[in-house]
Amino acid sequence: MRRENKTSTGAGADESKSPAAHTAELLLECRSGSLKARDALVRRFLPKMQRWAKGRLPQYARDVAATEDLVQNTFIRALDHVENFDAQREGAFLAYLRQIFINQLRDEVRRHVRRPAAEPLTTEPTDDHRSILEAAIGVEALEAYDQALQTLPATDQQAIVMRLEFGYQYTEIAADLGLTSANAARMRITRAIGQLAKLIDHEQLRP
């Protein structure tokens, strides 16, 4: 991706603002065609996505596409269609990127299944880079988790993704969602996770 040597983060974005306000402003500038705003969004979210995505691509499929390539493609797809996305929160944009990545991941796995088996590459670590979620529930449950997650209200989805998958602090989530305190964010996430667990159980018990 193209990099700017300048330190400015967008045509008019102010980094002293809250992350949510700054992200929303950068997205607005992107819709107006600002390349500086595009680069600023990449700089802000690329490290988060790279850390999260490590080990997500199954070992046997790594001869098809490297995880980092999928992350790069995720940003290209997201920013090329930014006019279709209206994010007022940092968590909303992060969840949007996450879903694009997962959709690509599923496509790559399906593509690999249709091909003859090849020797897996071992250039990327797996277990040492599992997300908090993978460590908690296991890789086998992730598909049921993703399906159940999509049925929750958008703000609950974003809160769960920020906390369980990207490791945001409760204070950061509270600020992003406009909640009054870290404790309010904790309670919101606890309730959402409880609802998510019920949905996962229902999905797994379905014949």
Image (cartoon, rainbow, N blue to C red):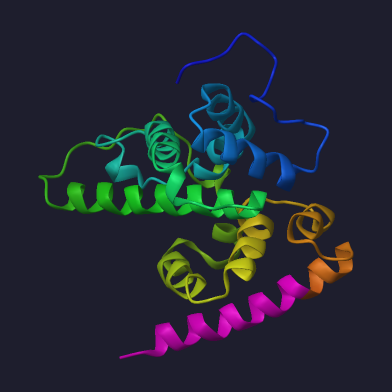
Main secondary structure of the magenta stretch: helix
Viewer-proximal residue among 188 and 193 = 188
183 within the magenta span: no
Residue 57 located left or right of residue 178: left
Which residue is painted at 31% across and 54% down in the image?
Answer: 106
Q: Quadrant of residue 158?
A: bottom right
Q: What are the residue bounds of the magenta stretch? A: 188-207
Residue, far top: 5
Q: Quadrant of the N terminus?
A: top left
**Residue 200 is inside the magenta segment:** yes
Residue located 35% across and 33% down the image:
66
Q: Residue 30: image x %, image y %?
A: 53, 34
- The residue depicted at 61 percent of the width and 8 percent of the height is 5
Q: In the rendered view, would you say 195 is above or below 47?
A: below
Q: Residue at x 69, y 27 (%)?
A: 12
Of residues 84 and 178, the one nearer the viewer is 84
Question: 145 or 157, which lies in front?
Answer: 157
Lateral position of residue 186 relative to residue 121, left or right: right
Quadrant the C terminus occupies = bottom left
Most distant residue in the front direction: 32
Q: Residue 51 in the image: state x and y as whole percent.
A: 58, 39
Estimate the x, y position of residue 163 in percent, counting from the top left: 69, 58
- Kindly indicate the quadrant of the structure image that contains residue 8: top right
**At which x and y percent is residue 157?**
58, 66
